């Protein structure tokens, strides 16, 4: 009975989204206040209905209702309770319901906190969000109904994919989706501005926190995914340039560019059209990501089961939404009120630096897009089945980000409109010298990968010291920091921390794959690892081979690790659980391979210096986004 | 030219230069880092040509897997239904690696044996990499070998 109710709720939500899409936009066009007023209640109704459907699906999972096909395919009576909740978004249908729920949450939040926007703008923003909801709810309802029955009901479900039975995966998809879907708000704003024909600094000020929050969540989601891949896949890497990772990274890059260009447009009125285009691009890339992940057109470690019909639906929707948005942009952008000529800027100015930031981030985004889609392109053109290797992404990304890192410390220190290059260079020169010195020091201290280690330390120190220099300047000035500034400082410090992690782990990482018998010991880097054998363990829904591995630094034992190989009862899938000795200065990472007979096992041992800094840096960047969004200035509506 | 025009010209030239540089860099990087996928019969026909590194896709022949006890060195044979190619690797094999399932190995050909630096296998019991399934489809039909489902039923 309950699943049918869920289906009815979805249908009602579809109607609410239809109302939210049509009436407010039409009302705004024809100046009908009553029609525009439908926007808010419709958004709230849609949220309540989708939330209801989501709760009902969760209930079906908790009660193990295997007569629901989706539950039967992704749950099992042995599945621990916590994973029954997260199994709701463990496969295509449920994760799409989560996507729709998050979209409705953003819609509800916009309806709630848009009291200070002019009625007509609010109606348009909510109307555009209604169109997007309409598309996704229709997609859910017509192609991927999570409430479909499976009759006769099986006695036992097939079980949740073991890869997803992990605490990290409980929160990774919600974070990621909040980020992805959050870009719908700046997108809707851009469309509203284009329909209206001018970009008002006050509305932009209203949009900025939304973009920052969405970007912050996307950062968290990507970082969680990377952390999970690190400890769960057993390969010891934290980023693979896999198509699905790229799908989330492209909107992140566009979003990072958007955050900066929105700041320029709000404060100086420059780059208004570019900001609108970026807002459209960021959301278009989110939709493209959804398409790539769910259609199965690309070979990836973690794409959902492929279904051409679903892919076609998203592709058509993507084409319609993005095509209409770009068409509107082409028709209207030229007629937007031109930039104020009194606000022009010289070559040495903060505007120029932010322009460079945007160019570099947008180029990086285009580079990732090309590399990700190239296999599709080559296939379509009959050039053969190809895959683009990580070195393509790694090399080009490094080339594009190097100038960005070089310019970053100047950004906050250089004045708007015009400044003296020599003055700023002199200001930062001693700090650049210090950063270089630290780099040289790293060169002599690094046992291997000297050039990379030196470059990593110098780059990180340069960003950190430049950011500190800005704090010093402020402290000697009026000493006041607003939330926006603190957020920027946190995010830039996050970049420095991330650089330490990403570049040093690349330079100093040691890895070995060895066959080990019980009692055997190998030296790796400054550590030694002693294999003590494997015993059997019984988990709730799996049996595992659990190894005992002692880690030594010199002669002192510092850790006893238990890497595991789990075989899940249903389906017989085997999963690797790495044993990790985690420290700020680096991890010792041990993963089991396969048994080699005679109690010997294949073992993968990695030393990963500073790898935690990667995720800690990302955390700081996300925090920066949230703190910026909390700035009081964004809540005032008057000039 | 007025100073304004001259400045604009400089900007346009700079943008063109940057664009050209970026395009050539991307083209260069792409060319060096794409790996083609071949099946054993294509490899034996000589399709990879002078390319030193490429990817090999196919099914692991049942009963072909051999490994010296206590060592990582493994040997197995990959087939596409028409032809077979021996593969040897000293890397840890993925969890889902098994005889009779699809694999994609990347590496190089040496004296008629494929030396793999990396072996990837399907990541759940029903999944065969789409590109391998596409390539092997014809061979399967010809030899009446059951085609594994591309997606979960």
Image: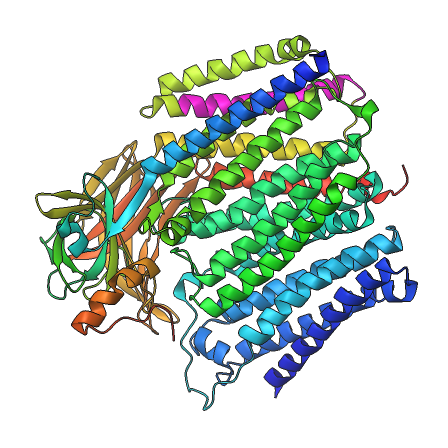
Residue found at x 65% / y 28%? A355
Q: Is residue B127 above or below residue A255?
A: below
Q: Is residue B103 above or below residue A434?
A: below
List x then y, in percent, for residue A437.
Answer: 47, 13
Q: Quadrant of the N terminus of chain A?
A: bottom right
Q: Is the image coloured rainbow, by chain, by secondary structure, or in one colour?
A: rainbow
For the stretch drawn in magenta, the main secondary structure is helix
Query: Which of A58 and B79 lies nearest the eye of the viewer?
Result: B79
Query: Which of B141 and A77 lies nearest the eye of the viewer?
Result: B141
List x then y, in percent, for residue A357.
Answer: 61, 30
In the picture provided, is A562 more to the left or to the right than A5?
left
Q: Is residue A494 above or below residue A84?
A: above
In the picture provided, is A511 more to the left or to the right than A469?
left
Residue found at x 23% / y 41%? B53
List x then y, in percent, for residue B136.
Answer: 24, 63
Q: Quadrant of the C terminus of chain A?
A: top right
Q: Residue at the far front: name it.
A: B1
Question: Residue A571: in sight, yes or no?
Answer: yes
Q: Quadrant of residue A199?
A: top right
Query: Which of A120 and A339 lies nearest the eye of the viewer?
Result: A339
Residue found at x 47% / y 26%? B21
Question: Residue A87: in sight, yes or no?
Answer: no
The range drawn in magenta is A453-478
Q: Quadrant of residue A307?
A: bottom left
List x then y, in percent, for residue A225.
Answer: 48, 51
Q: Residue at the far bottom: name it.
A: A152
In the picture provided, is A372 more to the left or to the right than A403?
left
Query: Which of A182 and B150 lies nearest the eye of the viewer?
Result: B150
Q: Quadrant of residue A605?
A: top left
């Amino acid at each position: 009975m309950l699943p049918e109710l869920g289906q009815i709720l979805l249908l009602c939500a579809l109607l609410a989204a239809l109302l939210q899409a049509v009436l407010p936009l039409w009302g705004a066009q024809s100046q009908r206040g009553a029609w525009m007023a439908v926007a808010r209640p419709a958004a709230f109704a849609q949220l309540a209905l989708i939330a209801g459907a989501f709760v009902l699906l969760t209930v079906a999972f908790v009660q193990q209702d295997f007569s629901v096909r989706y539950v039967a395919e992704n749950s099992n009576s042995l599945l621990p309770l916590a994973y029954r909740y997260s199994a709701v978004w463990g496969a295509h249908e449920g994760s799409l319901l989560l996507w729709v729920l998050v979209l409705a949450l953003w819609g509800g939040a916009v309806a709630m906190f848009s009291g200070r926007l002019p009625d007509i703008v609010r109606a348009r923003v909510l109307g555009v969000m209604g169109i997007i909801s309409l598309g996704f709810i229709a997609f859910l309802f017509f192609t991927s109904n999570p409430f479909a029955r499976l009759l006769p009901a099986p006695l036992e479900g097939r079980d949740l994919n073991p890869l997803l039975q992990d605490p990290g995966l409980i929160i990774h998809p919600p974070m990621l989706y909040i980020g992805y879907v959050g870009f719908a708000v700046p997108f809707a704003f851009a469309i509203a501005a284009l329909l209206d024909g001018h970009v008002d600094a006050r509305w932009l000020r209203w949009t900025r926190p939304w973009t920052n929050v969405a970007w912050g969540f996307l950062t968290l989601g990507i970082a969680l995914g990377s952390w999970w891949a690190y400890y769960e896949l057993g390969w010891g890497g934290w980023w693979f340039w896999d198509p699905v990772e790229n799908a989330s990274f492209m909107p992140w890059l566009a979003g990072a560019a958007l955050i900066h260009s929105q700041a320029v447009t709000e404060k100086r009125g420059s780059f208004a059209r570019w900001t609108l285009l970026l807002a459209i691009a960021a959301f278009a890339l989110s939709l493209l990501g959804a398409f790539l992940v769910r259609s199965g057109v690309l070979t990836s470690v973690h794409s959902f089961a492929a279904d051409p019909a679903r892919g076609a639906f998203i592709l058509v929707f993507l084409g319609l939404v993005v095509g209409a948005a770009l068409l509107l942009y082409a028709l209207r952008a030229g007629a937007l009120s031109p930039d104020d000529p009194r606000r022009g800027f010289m070559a040495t100015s903060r505007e120029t630096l932010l322009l460079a930031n945007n160019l570099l981030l947008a180029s990086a985004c285009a580079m990732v897009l090309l590399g990700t889609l190239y296999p599709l392109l080559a296939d379509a053109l009959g050039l053969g089945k190809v895959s683009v290797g990580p070195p393509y992404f790694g090399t080009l990304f490094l080339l594009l980000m190097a100038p960005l890192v070089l310019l970053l410390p100047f950004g906050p220190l250089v004045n708007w409109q015009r400044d003296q290059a020599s003055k700023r260079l002199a200001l930062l020169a001693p700090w650049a010298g210090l950063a270089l010195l630290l780099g040289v020091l790293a060169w002599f201290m690094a046992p291997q990968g000297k050039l990379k280690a030196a470059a990593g330390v110098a780059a990180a120190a340069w960003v950190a010291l430049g950011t500190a220099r800005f704090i010093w300047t402020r402290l000697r000035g009026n000493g006041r920091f607003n939330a926006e500034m603190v957020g920027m400082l946190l995010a830039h410090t996050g970049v420095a921390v991330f650089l330490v992690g990403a570049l040093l782990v690349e330079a100093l990482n040691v890895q070995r794959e060895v066959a080990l018998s019980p009692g055997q010991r190998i030296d790796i880097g400054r550590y030694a690892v002693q294999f003590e054998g494997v015993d059997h363990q019984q988990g709730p829904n799996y049996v595992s081979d659990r190894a005992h591995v002692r880690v030594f630094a010199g002669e002192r034992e510092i850790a006893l690790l238990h890497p595991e190989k789990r075989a899940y009862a249903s389906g017989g899938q085997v999963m690797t659980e790495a044993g990790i000795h985690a420290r700020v200065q680096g991890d010792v990472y041990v993963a089991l391979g396969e048994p080699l007979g005679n109690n010997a096992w294949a073992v993968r041992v990695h030393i990963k210096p500073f790898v935690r800094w990667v995720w800690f840096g990302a955390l700081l960047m996300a925090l920066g986004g949230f703190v910026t969004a909390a700035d009081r200035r964004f809540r005032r509506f008057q000039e | 030219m007025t100073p304004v025009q001259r400045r604009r010209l400089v900007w346009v030239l700079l943008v063109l230069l940057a664009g050209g540089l970026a395009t050539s860099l991307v083209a260069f990087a792409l060319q060096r880092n794409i790996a083609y996928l071949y099946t054993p019969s294509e490899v034996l026909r000589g399709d990879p040509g002078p390319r030193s590194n490429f990817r090999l896709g196919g099914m692991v022949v049942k009963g072909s897997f051999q490994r010296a006890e206590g060592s990582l060195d493994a040997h197995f044979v990959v087939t596409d239904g028409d032809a077979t190619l021996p593969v040897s690797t000293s890397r840890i094999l993925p969890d889902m690696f098994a005889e009779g399932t699809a694999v994609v190995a990347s590496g190089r050909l040496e004296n008629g044996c494929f030396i793999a630096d990396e072996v990837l296998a399907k990541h759940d019991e029903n999944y065969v990499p789409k590109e391998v399934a596409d390539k092997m489809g014809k061979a399967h039909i010809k030899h009446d070998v059951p085609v594994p489902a591309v997606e979960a039923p």
